[in-house]
Image (cartoon, grey):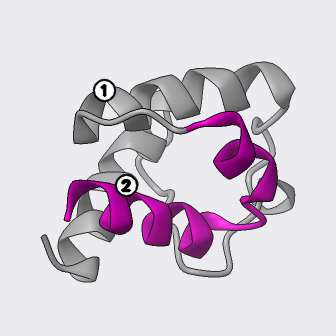
Amino acid sequence: MSREEVFAKLNEVFQDVFDDESITVTDATTADDIEEWDSLEHINLLAAVEQEFGMKFNMGQVVSMKNVGEMADIIISQIG
């Protein structure tokens, strides 16, 4: 799966989780960029991403993610 395909799916997940069709994520997107993105929504978001891509983040990956680009890198490394 290409990075572009991963971001297309991530956009769908973010739009669904935050119920906002206008969201478009980039490498640099962080929780500060999305008003509703708090700690509870972060858990919902991670669960939705894991389900969409059929993978699981480990705790080290979760705490190391600083932006959506790093999330995409982890997804790509796990789904090959």
The quarter of the picture where the C terminus appears is bottom left
The quarter of the picture where the N terminus appears is bottom left
Query: Which numbered circle lies on residue 41?
Result: none
> x%, y% of residue 4?
24, 80
**In the figure, is residue 31 to the left or right of 54?**
right
> x%, y% of residue 27?
57, 80
Q: Quadrant of residue 70?
A: bottom right
Residue 24 seen in this snapshot: no
What range of the chain is rendered magenta?
58-80
In the rendered image of this protein, does residue 49 appear above or below residue 67? above
**Between residues 8 and 54, which one lies in front from this camera angle?**
54
In the rendered image of this protein, does residue 69 appear above or below residue 63? below
Query: Which numbered circle lies on residue 51?
Result: 1
**In the figure, is residue 15 to the left or right of 61?**
left
> x%, y% of residue 15?
43, 43
Q: Identify the mark nearer the N-term, 2 or 1.
A: 2
Instruction: Identify which amino acid the numbered label 2 is placed on.
Output: Leu
Q: Mark 2 sits on what residue? A: 10
**In the figure, is residue 58 to the left or right of 19?**
right
Label 1: element kind = helix
**In the figure, is residue 71 to the left or right of 10?**
right
Q: Residue at x 17, y 79 (%)?
A: 2
Q: How many residues crowd mark 1 within 10 Å: few (<14), some (14–19), many (20+)? A: few
Count every numbered label the image shows and give the total. Answer: 2
Q: How many residues crowd mark 2 within 10 Å: few (<14), some (14–19), many (20+)? A: many
Distance in Å between CA atoms under marks 2 and 1? 11 Å
Instruction: Identify which amino acid the numbered label 1 is placed on.
Output: Gln
Q: Residue at x 30, y 26 (%)?
A: 51
Q: Quadrant of residue 78?
A: bottom left
Q: Is residue 12 magenta?
A: no
Q: Is residue 69 magenta?
A: yes
